[in-house]
Amino acid sequence: MKKRVSLVAPFYNESGNVLEFFRRIAAVADSMPQYEFEVIAVNDGSRDQTWAELLEARTRFPGVHLVDLSRNFGKEAALTAGLDRAHGDAVVPIDSDLQHPPEVLEQMLAQWELGAEVVLAQRTDRVTDGKLQKLSATSFYRFHNRISNIQVPMDVGDFRLMDRRVVEALRQMPENHRFMKGLFAWVGFRTVTVPYIHSNRGAGTSSFNFWKLWNLALEGITSFSTAPLKIWTYLGLGVSALALLYATIIVLKTIVSGVDVPGYASLMAGIMFIGGVQLIGIGVLGEYVGRIYHEVKRRPVYLVREEHCNERINDAR
Ligand code: UDP
Ligand code: MG
């Protein structure tokens, strides 16, 4: 019995990359005939020709399992849809924009055969990123790892090989808000890292702009840490202590040297500062309450419009 390897690829407006993606995967599958490969391609509500191209690709590579989501649910949901359908003994999420070279699979599978349950592909370069992108990524990981119980490794994305056991563990996670990097780290398991070079995108542009990344960062922090909630207790204690000290000083000063009317500036400064601090506190609270609200509704993570599945990629050809 050959071991089966599932590749899970989310597609969002990837028209132009589809055929090339399958060509690369098929070449890699051919070079490793000791495994049976299956590809689960999830179309995440693309607005361009991606779905048509996927259907077209399926006539050439009939082993592909196609899933069409009813709208754009986001990469994390698309990955979840793919993981739910992956049957492999090893499962590898991979970007469909050709930034994750499928050739790295060979090293990943070798590590897996040696007993690793998770093989992380770690990018050894960030040449395709701008300075600001680099800085924001670094600061996010630092901040996240400092305040969370789980450690998300740097320069590691969703590109990783997972043993069946790890996938089953992931599928047991019931949450709707799925910060995949965090969930991957949360489940643990024996992990090794292999280096890879992050390629430039094939066709198209990245769909993660600054605002999306900021929200993803918030998602990551609120999913795995309550430190932003707790900090207000200590901040409140600190501000109250200072206020008490200052109150004592001005009361004593008034008793000693009589009523001192001026104080407009310090009064305004105090009111505005405390008001601002309170608003920030309420905002942080809101981030969590909003997430609780979404979570308790228990809506499905994704909805499927259409699905085509059959055998694996290399015994169909
Ligand atoms: N993607 C998706 N749904 C989205 C956004 C992105 O399925 O809403 C997919 C996209 O097709 C690609 C992967 O997620 O395969 C990574 O997206 P992208 O290349 O835009 O992000 P970046 O590589 O810049 O982080
Ligand atoms: Mg990309």
Image (tube, grey):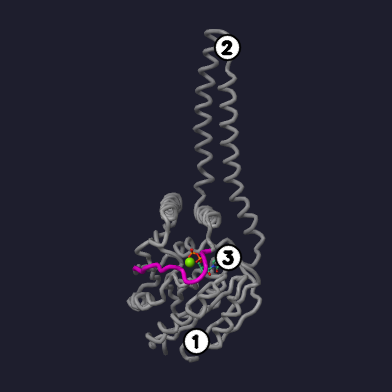
Q: In the image, is the residue at mark 3 within 8 Å of ligand 1 by its beta carbon?
A: yes
* Residue designated by label 3: 74
- Does residue 197 show up magenta in the picture? yes
Q: Is mark 3 in CB contact (under 8 Å) with mark 1?
A: no
- Mark 2 in CB contact with mark 3 (< 8 angstroms): no
Residue 47 rendering spot, x and y as whole percentages: 62, 70
- The percent position of residue 278, horizontal first and vertical second, equals 59, 37
**The disc labelled 3 sits on which kind of residue?**
Gly
Q: Magenta stretch: give its range.
A: 195-206
Query: Residue at 40% across / 60% down in the picture?
Result: 153
Residue 203 magenta-drawn?
yes
Residue 102: x and y in percent read 41, 76
Measured in 3D between alpha carbons, the distance from the residue under mark 2 to the one under mark 1, in whole angstroms, is 85 Å
Disc 1: residue Cβ within 8 A of ligand 1's nearest atom? no
Amino acid at dot 2: Asp
- The residue that mark 2 highlights is 260
